[in-house]
């Protein structure tokens, strides 16, 4: 099999779609302007290994996605995290695979079903858990359903598509030093990969830093990858818990730090954000000052599952719904997501044993918010104990009433609803409902739930439009991809 590639200048920087006709050896790949490519592979990724070899299919430490030709097979490589996914479908004798649902929809000419509730205020088709077997594998669409794949790679041998597990490259973790050394070595190899002179596009390492446990520890690891830039959110979502800024921690780690607000009146590329998961917990991450070219974002996501001092659930599961939200936005701004706690995740039981080991007692505080591994990682750099992780804080975006925030997105969504005969509240009504939803949530979380009251009054659940938010966002994304194709004279078969 061989690749035929074509750049689409107005596509998002890192998006790609591969198309294969049954019985053909040619793989047509359309891609954005900052996707890397060679004769045997196409990738938007950073991985543990030499960049020139393109062996991102032979590691479980790959951040981003790609296509690899090897031994007359095609290997569609997923990210080795739960934060990204690949989409694929079969239609009229062709296989389509992409890292973007919008791009797949444009090239295969498929549409989401408007009367299907993919996401609403209490449910999501993507509220899945780690535990690959529990993940969503298929999504209803017209005229054919769309398949999803996470973590495992997707192989095509000319006739059939099938999953294959990534290799497990992590060693056995018997002690803290084993685990820390693995994290450091991984970051050092990533540094060589992302900084390779053979890359066509520069990648800047950036770390998120808060006042908690996980992102400061991830930032310490990121320093081994050459990271000297940090981003932090000033405020937390709680008035009494105080600010969540990690600026002082970043500076103690020798990093510059740019601060962002937790909320804003407008968010860049907002519809692409809703298109990824239909939820807004990480919407404020669109406000980060991402580099103009490409970046790899070192994060502390999943630290609560892997590093917290509590027994490992059996079977081991991680809720991965909220963390999907950057999946489409990151392709536009050019970001590879790199959650450090996820490295070596298949050895979670061994990592938990280290957490409870006698050697970790000096870093164990014996309180509800207690994570000895990241505490030791950070304190051993010289950061004082009382400078971080004093209490649990939260910087997630409020999501009580799911409706676009930016004026342009809100207007476009309203037009979409009205064109389909649905009610669209006025801007004033949206503002009032949103304010009430915040107050209702505060009272429920801090008073009513503690009193044993479970019933909630959330009248906005009756607004049918919220159930079409996901469809609207993906409809707009599909149109954007199609317009970019038409601008250069590519007319896809309907």
Image: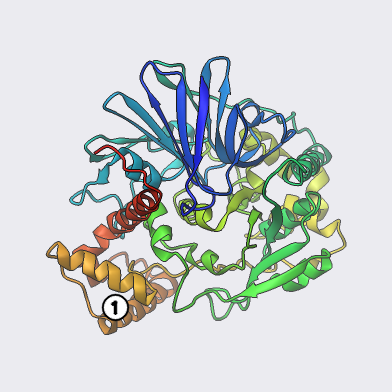
Question: For the point 76% across and 51% down, which residue is it?
Answer: 221
Binning the other alpha carbons within 10 Å of mark 1 as few (below 14), some (14 to 19) or many (20 upward) gives some
Question: For the point 28% across and 84% down, which residue is it?
Answer: 428
Left or right: residue 214 compared with residue 98? right
Depth order, front residue of 136/255: 255
Residue 361 drawn above or below residue 343: below
Tell me the colour scheme of the image: rainbow
Residue 322 spot, x, y in % from top left: 46, 54
Depth order, front residue of 448/54: 54
Residue 244 drawn above or below residue 343: below
Residue 239 spot, x, y in % from top left: 54, 81
One can see residue 433 in this view: yes
Residue 138: quarter of image: top left
Residue 462 drawn above or below residue 38: below
Depth order, front residue of 345/88: 88
Left or right: residue 31 compared with residue 298? left
Left or right: residue 417 compared with residue 355? left
Left or right: residue 177 compared with residue 440? right
Residue 378: quarter of image: bottom right
Residue 234 drawn above or below residue 469: below
Depth order, front residue of 368/47: 47
**Count of picture labels:** 1
- Quadrant position of the C terminus in the picture: top left
Residue 315 spot, x, y in % from top left: 50, 34
One can see residue 462 in this view: no
Determine whether the residue tagged by mark 1 lies in a helix, strand or loop.
Answer: helix
Question: For the point 47% across and 68% down, which residue is it?
Answer: 268
Circle 1 residue: 430
Residue 312 spot, x, y in % from top left: 58, 41
Task: In the displayed orientation, state which residue is furthest to the left.
Answer: 421
């Amino acid at each position: 099999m061989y690749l035929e590639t074509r750049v689409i200048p107005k596509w998002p920087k890192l998006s790609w779609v591969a198309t294969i006709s049954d019985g053909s050896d040619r793989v047509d790949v359309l891609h954005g302007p900052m996707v890397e490519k060679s004769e045997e592979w196409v990738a938007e990724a950073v991985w543990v290994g030499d960049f020139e070899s393109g062996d991102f299919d032979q590691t479980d430490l790959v951040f981003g996605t790609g296509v690899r030709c090897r031994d007359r097979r095609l290997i569609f490589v997923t990210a080795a995290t739960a934060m990204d996914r690949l989409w694929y479908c079969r239609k009229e004798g062709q296989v389509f695979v992409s890292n973007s649902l919008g791009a797949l929809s444009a090239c295969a000419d498929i549409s989401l079903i408007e009367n299907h509730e993919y996401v609403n205020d209490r449910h999501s088709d993507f509220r899945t858990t780690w535990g690959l077997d529990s993940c969503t594998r298929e999504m209803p669409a017209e005229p054919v359903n769309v398949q999803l794949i996470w973590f495992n790679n997707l192989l095509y041998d000319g006739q059939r598509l099938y999953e294959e597990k990534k290799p497990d490259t992590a060693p056995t973790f018997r002690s803290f030093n084993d685990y820390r050394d693995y994290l450091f070595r991984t970051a050092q190899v990533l540094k060589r990969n992302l900084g390779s002179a053979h890359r066509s596009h520069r990648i800047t390492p950036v770390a998120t830093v808060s006042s908690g446990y996980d992102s400061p520890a991830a930032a310490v690891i990121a320093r081994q990858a050459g990271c000297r830039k940090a981003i932090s959110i000033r405020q937390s979502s709680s008035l009494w818990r105080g600010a969540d800024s990690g600026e002082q921690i970043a500076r103690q780690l020798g990093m510059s730090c740019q601060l962002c607000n937790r909320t804003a009146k407008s968010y860049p590329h907002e519809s692409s954000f809703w298109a990824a998961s239909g939820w807004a917990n990480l919407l404020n991450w669109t406000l980060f000052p991402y580099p103009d070219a490409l970046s790899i974002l070192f994060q502390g996501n999943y630290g609560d599952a892997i590093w917290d001092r509590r027994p490992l659930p059996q079977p081991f599961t991680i809720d991965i719904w909220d963390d999907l939200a950057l999946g489409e936005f990151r392709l536009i701004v050019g970001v590879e997501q790199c959650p450090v706690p996820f490295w070596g995740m298949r050895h979670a039981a061994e990592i938990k044993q280290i957490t409870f080991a006698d050697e970790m007692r000096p870093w164990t505080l014996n309180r509800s918010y207690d994570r000895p591994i990241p505490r030791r990682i950070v304190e051993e750099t010289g950061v004082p104990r009382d400078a971080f992780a004093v209490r649990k804080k939260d910087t997630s975006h409020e999501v009580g009433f799911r409706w676009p925030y930016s004026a342009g997105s809100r207007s476009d969504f309203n037009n979409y609803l009205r064109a389909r005969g649905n009610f669209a509240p006025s801007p004033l009504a949206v503002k009032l409902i949103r304010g009430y939803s915040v107050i209702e949530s505060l009272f429920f979380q801090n008073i009513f739930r503690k009193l044993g009251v479970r019933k909630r009054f959330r009248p906005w659940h009756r607004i049918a439009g919220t159930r079409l938010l996901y469809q609207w966002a993906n409809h707009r994304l599909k149109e954007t991809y199609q317009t970019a194709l038409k601008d250069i004279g590519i007319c896809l078969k309907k």
